[in-house]
Amino acid sequence: MLPHRPGAADRRQRQRRRERPKNLLRRHTSGYCIPRAAKLALLAGSAYAGSVGVVVHVFDAAGYSTRDGVGEVPALLAAGAKLWIDADGADGAIADFLRDVLKLHPLAVEDILQDRPSPKVEDYGDYLYVVAHGLTRGRDDPEALDTVELDLVLTAQWIFTHHCGSLAVDAVRVELARNPRPLERGPAFVAHAILDHLVDYYLPVVDAFDEALDQVESQVVNDPTRAVLQRIFRLKRALQRLRRVALHQREVLHRLSRGEFDAIPEKALPFYRDVYDHFVRVADLADGYRDALSGALEAYLSTVSNRMNEVMKALTLIATVFLPLTFIVGVYGMNFDHMPELHSRWGYPATWIVMIIVAAAMIIWFRRRRWL
């Protein structure tokens, strides 16, 4: 009996087994931002023992405090406390909380739970919904730039934030534990602190691009290899992502800073204008670096073309020098019987002397014309 050979059905079955963890993760996380530990647990085929991290920052008559979970939020809202509800990740329970307790519009809830490709701001009347984008990449690698969405819902009494590991939110959380003054002044000042830190984290990215651009420009002049070309294209793609986010986010910050929304009091507008001014600088630098990279690409192509021209020039000069030498050798290589130079005693050295003189004369002439 011939040994069994796997057929198409066997290959499809193995493919389904390989894709099962990915499909499981997609089915459980579609539309939601969940903690990394939950994703790893789903991929491993086990249950996730943890929960979505929700911390409620409270400022009331007793001062500043925090709560884990959203169970006390209705009572705190009824008591008139100022709240910052911070959700690191989301699940079905958060969606129910947003609809039933905070009374958000279903479309706003859908936008919060799903990733938005670009920043935006929407005024729902009773509350203001803002989508901003921060950064998640390491500061030493501008080519690996990536953004993370940050959702903010703002009213006069509370602010809700939703994210997946935002550096800006973590920084404000630490500051609030030391000094709860922003929450005491109102949710709009907490939103300002978050956006201010979010913009500040763009500045190291800009500095990293500046250093990378200097390196690329030096390599283009000194060593224009194929690796340099690939790096230019990687940096251009990263800058394009940064510029695409910066254009929309600049408009969002501009609208927040000009007093267009009731959720932001007039006394907070100067702080928002300061954030807008900082981000305008980031957007302008992104445009400048994009133009500089285009110039570096043109310089690379020009340098490679010039080097190719130099090679072709050298090869052409070599072929030109050997052209008369090849003619002389070809003439005396015909071997006719009646060629007197073939039987001359000094014919061979005389031919060498003539070829050397011709070659030297041509090289001298090339040098005088500055072709060498």
Image (cartoon, grey):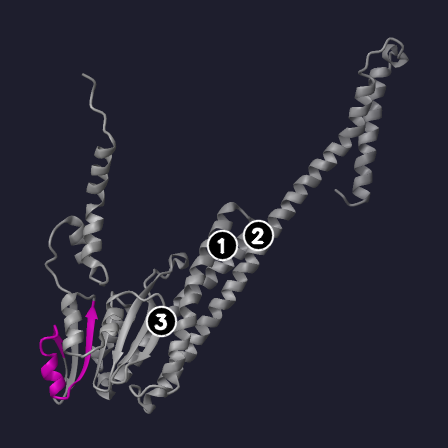
Q: Which residues are magenta?
A: 66-88
Element at badge 1? helix
Kindly report the distance in space between the C-alpha atoms of the residues bearing marks 2 and 1. Answer: 10 Å
Element at badge 3? loop
Q: Are marks 2 and 1 in contact (CB under 8 Å)?
A: yes
Q: Amino acid at mark 1?
A: Ile
The quadrant in which the N terminus is found is top left
Of 27 and 37, which appears nearest the observer?
A: 27
Residue 227, image x, y percentages: 48, 47
Q: Which marked residue is nearer to the observer: mark 3 or mark 2? A: 3
Q: Residues within 10 Å of mark 1 (few under 14, many from 20)?
A: many
Q: Residues within 10 Å of mark 3 (few under 14, many from 20)?
A: many
Of 99 and 321, which appears nearest the observer?
A: 99
- Which of the two discs, 3 and 1, labels the residue nearer the N terminus? 3
Q: Amino acid at mark 3?
A: Pro
Q: Which marked residue is nearer to the observer: mark 3 or mark 1? A: 3
Find residue 300 and name its label: 2
Residue 16, image x, y percentages: 21, 42
Q: Amino acid at mark 2?
A: Tyr
* Residue that appears at 16% across and 82% down: 58
Tell me where residue 124 sits by quadrant: bottom left
Above or below 361: residue 161: below
Kindly report the distance in space between the C-alpha atoms of the residues bearing marks 3 and 2. Answer: 35 Å
Residue 80, image x, y percentages: 14, 88
Write down the residue under mark 1: 232
Write down the residue under mark 3: 119
- Which of the two discs, 3 and 2, labels the residue nearer the N terminus? 3
